[in-house]
């Protein structure tokens, strides 16, 4: 996890459960459902040991925080020009331990479907993703105040001899370390991560 001073990081290959969607995360039912699906599947996997059905290689762990990739229907999103949030396209996701296979994921889907048949789990996908070279910084405070922190991150990227590499294949990335339902806006902690490339 970064400090409030930006830093460069090489992000390795990791396993995620992901759900894609669109719309304002504050009002979109699609976003609310995505979050319910992600936590439902993540905790189904974590608690599988309770039913004697722990995956091979299982170890005790804490479910990682929610993360989000963000872009716009008509272009890239750098996190600064927020504009109309209804135009957001997003991928919400939660990292999974390395022992999680696609078969384990499908078993978790089947278990959650029995428990919560109202959820449409077809949108959930198992993904192995390597983010690569990035710069990141810790933002403290309201999500709407992120642009100032992102400007600091972008200046660091330029001063360090890199260039932003946000594209249709690499995105503005946020990792939510705080629960906005429980923490005051001024106390929220969010990792902001941008893909970069060497400026040659």
Image: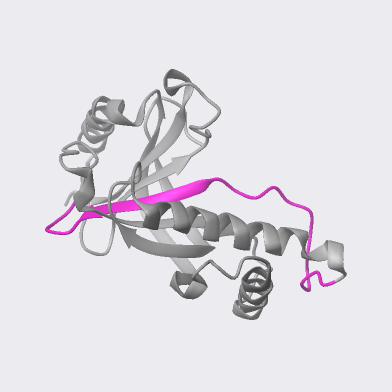
Query: Relative to 121, is 138 above or below?
Result: above
Q: Position of residue 25 (x, y in %)?
A: 35, 46
Left or right of 46? Residue 95 is left
Q: How many marks?
A: 0
Q: Position of residue 34 (x, y in %)?
A: 46, 58
Residue shown at the point (25%, 38%) measured from the top left? 157
Residue shown at the point (47%, 34%) measured from the top left? 2
- Residue sticking out furthest to the bottom: 103
Left or right of 158? Residue 94 is right
Q: Position of residue 123 (x, y in %)?
A: 44, 71
- Range covered by the magenta-colored residues: 53-76
The one of 35 and 104 positioned closer to us in this rendering: 35
Q: Is residue 185 magenta?
A: no
- Residue sticking out furthest to the left: 74
Query: Relative to 100, is 149 above or below?
Result: above
The one of 38 and 116 positioned closer to us in this rendering: 116
Q: Main secondary structure of the magenta part?
A: loop
Q: Is residue 64 magenta?
A: yes
Left or right of 43? Residue 91 is left
């Amino acid at each position: 996890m970064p400090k409030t001073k930006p830093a460069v990081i090489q992000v390795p290959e990791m396993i995620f459960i992901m759900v894609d969607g669109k719309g304002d995360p504050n009002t979109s039912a699609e976003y609310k459902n995505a979050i319910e699906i992600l936590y439902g599947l993540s905790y189904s996997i974590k608690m599988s040991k309770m039913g004697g059905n722990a995956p091979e290689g299982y170890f005790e762990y804490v479910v990682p925080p929610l993360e989000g990739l963000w872009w716009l229907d008509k272009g890239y999103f750098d996190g600064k020009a927020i504009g109309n949030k209804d135009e957001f396209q997003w991928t919400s996701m939660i990292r999974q331990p390395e022992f999680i296979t696609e078969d384990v994921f499908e078993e978790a889907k089947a278990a959650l479907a029995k428990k919560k048949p109202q959820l449409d789990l077809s949108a959930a996908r198992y993904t192995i993703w390597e983010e690569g070279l990035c710069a990141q910084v810790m933002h403290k405070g309201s999500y709407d105040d992120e642009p100032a922190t992102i400007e600091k991150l972008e200046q660091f990227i330029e001063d360090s001899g890199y260039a932003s590499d946000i594209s249709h294949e690499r995105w503005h990335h946020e990792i939510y370390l705080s629960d906005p339902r429980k923490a005051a806006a001024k106390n929220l902690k969010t990792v902001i991560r941008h893909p970069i490339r060497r400026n040659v």
